[in-house]
């Protein structure tokens, strides 16, 4: 079971806290938004994490100024897990 | 004993106001998304929260010590409901109003993940009201207004907050403004 970092693009404002906390996982595009390093497709939105990155990912979820991040385990996020933008 | 409470009440009031000033400045810096010198963005975010919490602790000490002091004649009601006090009800009422606003902003700040971004932010805008109200309370209610050092500090804080506000409203406020206005980075 892999932990994934979900980025809610409707909430994210590219403030760059997550890219600071997870420099090995996330790069920043020119507009400030996080870009999962070496990932494509869905894994840019649901980024699989190595165990070593889980703690930093937790911090990023806690500190994201827009509450745009969440973590989920396993294959699929459970529905209704969070209410984006609320 | 009373003298000591009175003195402590004033000192803790100043410390609290100075920390709230710092917290507003850090909040605005936090919002800009910019790091500062050696401080990364997440440190500024944490510093903003921690200084706000420390300011609130000093605010509690400020009110608590004046409650124990007989000169200020504070009633427990004056802590929650503004403008009822017996000693300078208007200026003291501003202090009460600021306290109520601080409690709202801090509680919703700590419960941000629980209540969601929209409610958090709606209440957090009140923080721009807290600062002038608290400063007016200190100037109007305090007994140290005539002292040079206090006026100097108050003026310096006002200049800093006004400058930060102008920056907040300027088109280049966000770290990413340049790129987002359609310019190539
Ligand atoms: C537990 C306490 C607090 C927490 C967790 C907290 C958290 C935050 C966060 C996450 C932001 C960024 C919001 C965004 O980027 O949209 C922010 C902004 C800000 N905070 Fe706080 N804060 C707290 C207390 C306070 C207090 C007590 C004040 C003022 C007296 C304050 C003043 C500000 C200001 C002025 C901004 C910038 C708002 C803007 O222009 O968008 N904060 N705060
Ligand atoms: S910290 Fe939040 S708002 Fe900032 S870039 Fe990361 S996900 Fe987006």
Image (cartoon, rainbow, N blue to C red):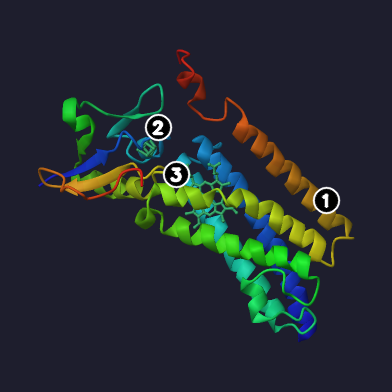
From the top left corner, tell me how far across and down residue B15 is, in percent: 69, 62
Q: Dividing the picture into quarters, in which one does residue B139 lie? A: bottom right
Q: Secondary structure at mark 2?
A: loop
Q: Kindly tell me whether residue B100 is visible in this rendering.
A: yes
Q: Secondary structure at mark 3?
A: helix
Above or below, B48 against B16 in this view is: above
Above or below, B39 against B61 in this view is: above
Q: Secondary structure at mark 1?
A: helix
Which numbered circle lies on residue B113? Answer: none
A63 left or right, relative to A25: right
Q: Is mark 1 within 8 Å of ligand 1?
A: no
Q: Kindly tell me whether residue B54 is visible in this rendering.
A: no
The single residue placed furthest to the top in the displayed view is B184
Are the residues tagged 1 and 3 within 8 Å (C-beta)? no
Q: Which residue is mark 1?
A: B152
Specify which label sits upstream in the sequence, 1 or 3: 3
Q: Residue at x 22, y 50 (%)?
A: A81
Answer few, some or many: residues within 10 Å of disc 1's Cα (few below 14, many 20 plus, some between 14 and 19): few
Q: Residue at x 74, y 46 (%)?
A: B158
Q: Residue at x 76, y 87 (%)?
A: B1
From the top left corner, tell me how far across and down residue A30 is, in percent: 40, 21
**Same chain assignment for discs 2 and 1:** no
Q: Is mark 2 within 8 Å of ligand 2?
A: yes
Q: Which residue is mark 3?
A: B42
From the top left corner, tell me how far across and down residue B6 is, in percent: 77, 77
Chain ID, mark 2: A
Are the residues tagged 2 and 1 within 8 Å (C-beta)? no
B55 left or right, relative to A38: right
Q: Which residue is mark 2?
A: A14
Numbered disc in front, either 2 or 1: 2
Query: Could you give the CA–CA distance between mark 2 and mark 1, rounded to whole angstroms?
Result: 39 Å
């Amino acid at each position: 079971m892999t932990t994934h970092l979900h980025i809610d693009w409707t909430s994210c404002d590219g403030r760059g806290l997550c890219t600071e906390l997870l420099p090995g996982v996330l790069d920043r595009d020119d507009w400030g938004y996080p870009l999962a390093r070496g990932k494509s497709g869905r894994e840019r939105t649901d980024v699989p994490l190595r165990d070593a990155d889980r703690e930093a990912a937790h911090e990023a979820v806690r500190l994201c100024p827009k509450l745009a991040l969440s973590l989920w385990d396993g294959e699929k996020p459970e529905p209704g897990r969070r209410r984006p933008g609320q | 004993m009373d003298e000591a409470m009175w003195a402590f009440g004033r000192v803790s009031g100043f410390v609290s106001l100075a920390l709230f000033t710092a917290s507003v400045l850090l909040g605005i810096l936090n919002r800009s998304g910019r790091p500062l010198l050696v401080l990364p963005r997440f440190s500024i975010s944490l510093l903003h929260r921690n200084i706000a919490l420390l300011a609130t602790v000093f605010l509690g000490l400020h009110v608590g010590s004046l409650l124990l002091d007989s000169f200020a004649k504070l009633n427990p009601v004056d802590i929650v409901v503004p403008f009822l006090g017996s000693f300078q009800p208007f200026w003291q009422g501003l202090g009460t109003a600021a306290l109520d606003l601080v409690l709202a902003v801090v509680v919703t700040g700590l419960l941000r993940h629980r209540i969601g971004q929209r409610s958090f932010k709606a209440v957090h805008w009140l923080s721009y009201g807290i600062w002038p109200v608290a400063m007016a309370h200190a100037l109007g209610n305090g007994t140290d207004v005539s002292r040079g050092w206090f006026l100097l500090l108050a003026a310096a804080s006002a200049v800093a907050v006004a400058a930060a506000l102008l920056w907040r409203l300027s088109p280049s406020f966000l770290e990413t403004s340049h790129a987002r206005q359609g310019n190539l980075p």
